[in-house]
Image (cartoon, helix red, strand yellow):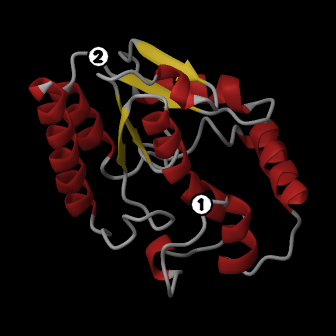
Amino acid sequence: MDGVLANFHQALFDLYSIKVDQYELIAKPPFSYDIHNWVSAVLKLKISEAGMWLNIDDAAVNRKFWANIAPYPWFWDVWSLCNQLADEVIISTSPGHHHAAFSQKREWLKKWLPDAKRIMMGADKHLMAKPNHILLDDSEHNCAEFLRHGGKAVIFPQLWNSGFQIRDWRDKLHHIESELKNQIKRMDAI
């Protein structure tokens, strides 16, 4: 969900009152998937990782941080594409270790995807891996684990992964449509 449908990074920039375009920040992508690296290196904020997450927890309690994350501009296009290509779409998101994230992510889903039938909350996305399942994710680690456990995976292009050079949202959509169709074609051939 975060990094594919929900713009966690922009919410983090907003939390720190930083007015930036995340695509103008990085001189040499891909940057680390580790969000603390974004905060400390890219945004030049001197804060510990624990301090960063405490700020997010505080914002979750006082401002419903997780529930109020804005969707990406391509949100509806990606959701529609997945539903066109698959018989069943499961939203998968990790609530991490933050007490408010679980309930607020459910709130986000009710607001933006009230008709979503299947939701899996947990960090271990690979538990859903099967030969006929495709994970669409911005984390190369999650995709690698999904593949290792017998599923298929498509990396959603973002600045922090190998798809960093695909910046325009229409190009991202075209890329994932092509990759998803290729994966489906390979599954149909088996």
Please tell me which of labels 2 and 1 falls first in the chain. 1
- Place residue 172 in its image quadrant: bottom left
Can residue 108 be seen at all in this image of the molecule?
Answer: no
- Density class for disc 2 (Cα within 10 Å; few <14, some 14-19, many ≥20) is few
Residue 22 appears at what percent x and percent y?
50, 71
Q: Which residue lies furthest to the bottom in this view?
A: 27
Identify which amino acid the numbered label 1 is placed on. Answer: Tyr
Q: Which residue is drawn at 49% across and 50% down?
A: 3
- Position of 128 relative to 142 (above/below): above
**Residue with the mark numbered 1:** 33
Q: Which residue is drawn at 29% across and 34% down?
A: 79
Q: Which residue is drawn at 82% across and 43% down?
A: 57
Residue 108 appears at what percent x and percent y?
53, 30
In the foreground, 93 or 153: 153
Q: What is the number of the mark on residue 101? A: none
**Would residue 180 appear left or right of 23 to someone viewing this image?**
left
Residue 73 appears at what percent x and percent y?
33, 52
**Residue with the mark numbered 2:** 88
In the foreground, 129 or 103: 129
In the foreground, 169 or 189: 189
Can residue 50 be seen at all in this image of the molecule?
Answer: yes
**CA gap, disc 2 and disc 1:** 28 Å
- Place residue 118 in its image quadrant: top left
- Position of 171 relative to 115 (above/below): below
Q: What element carries label 2?
A: loop
Report if the CB atoms under discs 2 and 1 are less than 8 Å apart: no
Q: Which residue lies furthest to the top in this view?
A: 117
